């Protein structure tokens, strides 16, 4: 059951990833990216990260994708479509290097993991409670720092995009 | 249950797809989307290791990375809008003022 779910999700994730990088229309790319993010949320479910699966869907597939689609709508969408791809050297070498990277890293990950299996998860692993207890205890200062980062990003985004302050 | 290495291989493939996207696309928004793809591949690896070693820290890092991605998308898209206003194009090759 879980194995079947895994392979379906893997197929969906890789296929939508391919569409993201290959489709000429940026809107189709963005929608494929949303699909990809949702299939990754499915992986999170399989890996007992329920809370993060929901965060992934709400923040990533919700907020960030809406932001990207909104900007695509604001700008001329055909503009992205009109832009040609990179030069011939980049066009041939890029995928080759990326494929080589995937092959080398994938091969080594496969071998290094050996016959590793998932142990039985402790009760309540990946729930809001488990994450919250850790987040507000050991990761308290990073948590505060990241909230500061969000404020800075918010102010920065307004500052950058506003025509006249 | 599927073994951890399957998840890690999927994560590697997704990361490589993201790299290819950044190398191939020239539209700024498309490149941003490829970067999101790479961030997600890293997230998947983090979650896999968190589950494999039964450590909740991995999930907390993913929590931070998602926050970071939201900030990055906001600032990145603001830059794209500013760029479009300046050049009326999102082609990153037209932005070569500081190019050596």
Image (cartoon, coloured by chain):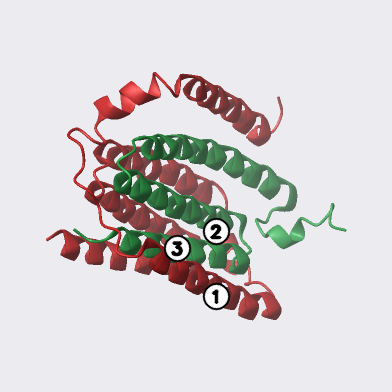
Chain colours: A red, B green
Q: Which residue is mark 1?
A: A100
In the image, taking residue A9 as reference, residue B24 lies left or right, namely right
**Dot 1: within a 10 Å radius of its alpha carbon, few (fewer than 14), some, or many (20 or more) residues?**
few
Q: Quadrant of residue B7?
A: bottom left
Which image quarter is the N terminus of chain A in?
A: bottom left
Q: CA distance from mark 1 to mark 3?
A: 11 Å
* Residue indicated by mark 2: B30
- Element carrying mark 3: helix
Q: Please name the residue shown 56% across and 52% down the image.
A: B32
Which chain contains the residue that carries disc 3? B
Residue at 59% over, 62% down: B22
**Chain ID at mark 2:** B
| Any part of residue A1 in sight | yes
Q: Residue furthest right?
A: B100
Residue A96, quarter of picture: bottom right
Mark 2 or 3 closer to N-term?
Answer: 3
* Disc 2 versus disc 1: nearer the observer: 1
Q: CA distance from mark 2 to mark 1?
A: 22 Å
Q: Can residue A19 be seen at all in this image of the molecule?
A: no
């Amino acid at each position: 059951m879980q194995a079947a779910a895994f392979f379906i999700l893997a197929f969906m994730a890789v296929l939508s990833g391919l569409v993201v990088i290959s489709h000429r229309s940026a809107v189709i790319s963005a929608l494929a990216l949303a699909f990809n993010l949702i299939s990754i949320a499915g992986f999170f479910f399989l890996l007992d990260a329920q809370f993060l699966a929901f965060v992934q869907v709400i923040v990533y597939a919700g907020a960030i994708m809406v932001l990207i689609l909104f900007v695509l709508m604001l700008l001329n969408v055909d503009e992205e479509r009109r832009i040609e791809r990179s030069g011939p050297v980049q066009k041939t070498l890029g995928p080759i290097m990326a494929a080589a990277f995937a092959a080398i890293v994938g091969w080594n990950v496969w071998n290094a993991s050996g016959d590793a299996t998932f142990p039985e998860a402790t009760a309540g692993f990946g729930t809001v409670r488990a994450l919250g207890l850790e987040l507000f205890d050991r990761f308290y200062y990073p948590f505060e720092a990241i909230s500061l980062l969000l404020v800075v990003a918010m102010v920065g985004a307004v500052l950058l995009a506003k025509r006249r302050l | 249950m599927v073994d951890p290495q399957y998840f890690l291989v999927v994560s590697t493939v997704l990361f490589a797809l993201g790299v290819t996207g950044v190398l191939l696309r020239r539209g700024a928004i498309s490149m941003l989307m490829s970067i999101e793809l790479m961030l997600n591949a890293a997230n998947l690896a983090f979650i896999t290791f968190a589950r494999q070693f039964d450590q909740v820290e991995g999930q907390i890092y993913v929590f931070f990375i998602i926050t970071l991605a939201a900030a990055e998308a906001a600032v990145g898209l603001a830059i794209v809008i500013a760029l479009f206003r300046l050049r009326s194009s999102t082609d990153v090759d037209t932005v070569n003022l500081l190019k050596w």
